Image (spheres, rainbow, N blue to C red):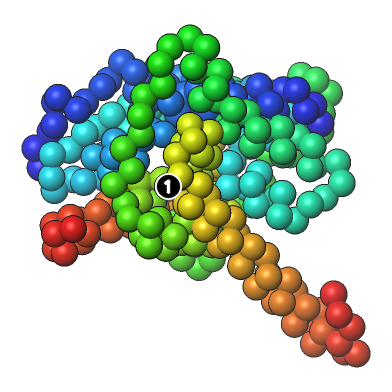
Amino acid sequence: MTIDWSAFTPWSALAGGVLIGIAAAMFALLNGRVAGISGVVGGLLRPARGDVGWQAAFVLGLVGAPLVYLLFTGLPKPQIDAQYAALIAAGLLVGVGTRYGSGCTSGHGVCGLSRLAPRSLVATAAFMGAGFATVFVVRHLLGV
Amino acid sequence: MNVFTSLLAGLVFGLGLIVSGMANPAKVLGFLDLAGHWDPSLALVMAGAIAVGSVAFAVASKRKVSLLGAEMKLATARHIDRRLVVGSVLFGIGWGSAGFCPGAGLVALGMGEAKAAVFVAAMLAGMAVFELLERRRQTAVHGSVRDPAGRAA
């Protein structure tokens, strides 16, 4: 392993992380819920009266964030190297996996680890481990 | 539950993903590539988020209602089972193949990225597959155990 110091952005990473933490804190303290993105999106596919409004509002906030960011400064352009077939496979896996696993990077990774929930610790170790392994296979064994 | 605070929380979450660089799949994959040129940034995103989150959840877990009077519905499940582990591994494989987690996909969709739209559509399809399988599983359980007549759920 070599650390890519030119790509490392510690201050913006910390600042963005704090913002994510504030969002999770708002959700827990004001709304009494865990800010789990896959759970909220998945909930919309199982619409329950009384839940659809706040679930849709949360998703709208996420999708609308770039517009608000644009009010302050130019948007960074995301670099998406994956081909369309890989994006479809990845989306399907992320959709099925986060619902069976009851959470993703936000629900388990941020909120769950903040609460020291053993379930979330196991889930985070599992998806991080699988993520490391997948990138290793794709980049270093298959050489894509 | 308050729709406005949900919108605001979603917005702040999305801004955090943009500021941290985590709405950019190339940066996420740079973190997941331990054997290559490793970018440790994502670890600091987690550290910053958990530092704030741990204080908030410590307070929240002691409360019976939220600051706005909503019922506290923080997750209570404690069991570690195959669903949790297999589901999380599948998520990790998907995350590692494109660099998108659900939140990053939605934010990149908001940036107008066509590839993010394809990812989000496939993710919704995957979640719909889960709903169908779950409904079938519950029908099977209710049909054989609770309702021998096999009434459709």
Residue A118 rendering spot, x and y as whole percentages: 49, 47
Residue at coordinates 31% horizontally, 37% vertically from top-left?
A79
Name the residue furthest bottom. Answer: B149
- Outermost residue, left direction? A2
Q: Can you say which quadrant of the picture contains the N terminus of chain A?
A: top left
Query: Which residue is drawn at the image coordinates 35% and 46% (left, top)?
Result: B99
Residue B59 vs residue A29, the one in the foreground: A29
The quarter holding residue B75 reads top right
Which chain contains the residue that carries disc 1?
B
Q: Is residue B2 left or right of residue A77?
A: right
Quadrant in which the C terminus of chain A is drawn? bottom left
Q: Is residue A24 above or below residue A94?
A: above
Where does residue B121 sit, x and y in percent of width and height? 55, 54
- Horizontally, is B143 left or right of B12 in the view? right
- Which residue is label 1 attached to? B115
**Amino acid bearing label 1:** Lys
Q: Is residue A110 visible?
A: no
Task: Return the x and y of residue A66 as percentages of the image width and height.
Answer: 51, 25
Q: Name the one closer to the observer, B116 or A107.
A: B116
> Which one is in front, A3 or B81?
A3
Q: Is residue A103 left or right of residue A105?
A: right
Is residue B68 placed above or below A137 in the rendered structure?
above
Dot 1 crowding, Cα within 10 Å, few <14, some 14–19, many 20+: some
The residue depicted at 17 percent of the width and 38 percent of the height is B38
- Residue A133 occupies which quadrant of the picture? bottom left
Say what secondary structure mark 1 lies in. helix
Q: Residue at x 72, y 22 (%)?
A: B5
Give x and y (percent) for residue A17: 43, 24
